[in-house]
């Protein structure tokens, strides 16, 4: 008898993903860099924060909705862009449908396996994500394509420094999948018949190409081809970011900010929003958890731009904590990837329902009628919890 496909926590979705996915695919989703200190801190820091619930004065009805960059969302949760190559045959289209069904905005990676046109067809509220990669002409063409497809905002991700080595080992990922690679990877794949069957049934094999980076009249580069182009592109200056923002001409989210001075510089560059992010622990290891860095950044930029956070969100309570400390909304990465692996589109919907339920419980228990009313007063923040990076320090406080 097949077990109940519904799961009650993101932790259970992860357990199922580990079971169903070939270890190479699962390992690519765990990701993280070096010793994994940031990866662990992103989730661990949320557990250090306590709630301060009230006993009387609860509200029978609670509003969890918000807007992000002017786009309405049923929840203060956005799908974070990830290249979900090989997790599920329907990939980002399944994620987009799930997000649309739950009234949530979909962030689509330019490294994704599905074309932006198919994704905006499944969810009208798509934010398109790009790295600083390739020539300005190529970037302008990719932006034009996303705009024509109906993307409502651009996410520029800058927090990546090609720091690879993982103490627990990086999975081997093939450049393309042909008969030879299939035979080579068979011992890894055959013990995971459900995953294999899903692809066989769909008539597709994971092709590991990046259709959104396909030049007009050319071929879509492979994932590694795209990665190579990115590595060889000279890193952007603030002037380049201003160019990108102007070229896009619409709402612009800068993802990857961890320092107060960068956040203020981003305001000057005219961005509409930032996400406090360390790329889910995939940039420089030992960068503090984003939830520790959020309060100082939110404080510094005030209402000038929208401040989002991503990294370590696994529960609705984590969403509530991020909102209480100054985020307008959060982006989630691995949580929905575990759901997608565990049960396709329904698994992503399941994860969004878990986040909704947990957030709603927190708003109820904390005595609010709206998630927008969450504040630091709702939390017990232990001494020394927060971290401040890139802010001018008063004399004699260096290192604190
Ligand atoms: C497997 C994987 C692939 C990712 N790919 C991208 C990407 O293509 N573009 C991007 O901006 N961020 C990417 N990220 C980072 C996520 O958007 C997000 O910042 C991070 O996953 C948040 O942390 P969380 O997974 O703990 O929620 C990726 C993360 C993972 C785990």
Image (cartoon, rainbow, N blue to C red):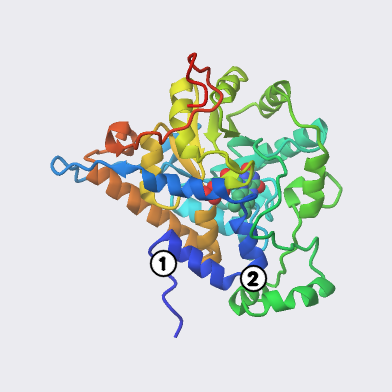
Give how far apart the Cα atoms at labels 2 and 1 are.
20 Å
Q: Can residue 119 be seen in the rendering of this structure?
A: no
**In this picture, residue 154 sits left or right of residue 177:** left
Task: Establish if 386 lies above or below 364.
Answer: above
32 or 185: nearer the viewer? 32
How many residues crowd around disc 2 within 10 Å: few (fewer than 14), some, or many (20 or more)? many
**Residue 130 in the image: x percent, y percent?**
68, 39
Outermost residue on the bottom side: it is 1
Q: Could you say whether the residue bearing mark 1 is in a helix, strand or loop?
A: loop
169 or 135: nearer the viewer? 169
**Residue 217 in the image: x percent, y percent?**
86, 47
**In this picture, residue 65 sits left or right of residue 393:** left
The residue under label 1 is 7
Outermost residue on the front side: it is 396
**Residue 189 in the image: x percent, y percent?**
68, 75
167 or 58: nearer the viewer? 167
Q: Could you say whether the residue bearing mark 2 is in a helix, strand or loop?
A: loop
Q: Quadrant of residue 303?
A: top left
Task: Establish if 108 lies above or below 91.
Answer: above
Disc assigned to residue 39: none
Q: Residue at x 21, y 40 (%)?
A: 367
Q: Residue at x 41, y 67 (%)?
A: 7
**Residue 31 in the image: x percent, y percent?**
62, 54
Q: Can residue 168 be seen in the rendering of this structure?
A: yes
Q: Earlier in the sequence, mark 2 or mark 1?
A: 1
Nearer the observer: mark 2 or 1; the answer is: 2
Disc assigned to residue 22: 2
Outermost residue on the left side: it is 56
Q: Residue at x 53, y 35 (%)?
A: 276
Outermost residue on the right side: it is 218
100 or 242: nearer the viewer? 242
How many residues crowd around disc 1 within 10 Å: few (fewer than 14), some, or many (20 or more)? some
């Amino acid at each position: 008898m097949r077990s109940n496909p519904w799961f009650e926590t993101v932790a259970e979705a992860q357990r199922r993903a580990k079971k169903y996915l070939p270890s190479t695919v699962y390992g690519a989703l765990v990701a993280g860099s070096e010793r994994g200190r940031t990866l662990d801190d992103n989730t661990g820091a949320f557990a250090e924060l306590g709630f301060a619930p009230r006993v009387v004065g609860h509200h029978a009805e609670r509003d969890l909705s918000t807007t992000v960059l002017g786009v309405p969302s049923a929840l203060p949760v956005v799908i974070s862009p990830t290249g979900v190559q090989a997790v599920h045959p329907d990939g980002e289209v399944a994620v987009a449908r799930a997000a649309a069904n739950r009234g949530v905005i979909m962030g689509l990676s330019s490294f994704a396996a599905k074309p932006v046109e198919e994704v905006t067809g499944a969810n009208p509220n798509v934010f398109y994500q790009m790295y600083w990669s390739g020539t300005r002409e190529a970037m302008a063409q990719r932006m034009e394509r996303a705009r024509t497809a109906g993307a409502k905002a651009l996410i520029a991700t800058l927090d990546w420094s090609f720091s690879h080595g993982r103490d627990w080992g990086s999975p081997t990922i093939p450049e393309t999948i042909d008969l030879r690679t299939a035979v080579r990877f068979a011992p890894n794949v055959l013990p995971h018949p459900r995953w294999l069957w899903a692809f066989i049934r769909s008539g597709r094999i994971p092709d590991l190409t990046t259709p959104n980076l396909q030049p007009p009249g050319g071929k879509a580069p492979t994932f590694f081809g795209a990665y190579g182009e990115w590595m060889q592109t000279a890193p952007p200056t603030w002037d380049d970011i201003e160019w990108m923002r102007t070229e896009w001409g619409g709402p612009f989210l800068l993802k990857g900010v961890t320092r107060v001075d960068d956040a203020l510089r981003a305001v000057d560059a005219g961005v509409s929003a930032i996400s406090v992010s360390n790329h889910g622990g995939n940039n420089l290891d030992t960068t503090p958890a984003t939830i520790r860095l959020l309060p100082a950044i939110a404080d510094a930029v005030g209402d000038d731009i929208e401040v989002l956070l991503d990294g370590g969100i696994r529960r609705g309570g984590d969403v509530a904590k991020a909102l209480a400390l100054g985020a307008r909304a959060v982006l989630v990465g691995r949580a929905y990837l575990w759901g997608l692996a565990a049960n396709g589109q329904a698994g992503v919907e399941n994860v969004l329902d878990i986040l909704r339920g947990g957030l709603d419980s927190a708003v109820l228990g904390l005595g609010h009628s709206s998630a927008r009313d969450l504040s630091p007063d709702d939390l017990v923040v232990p001494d020394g919890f927060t971290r401040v990076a890139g802010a001018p320090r008063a004399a004699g406080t260096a290192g604190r």
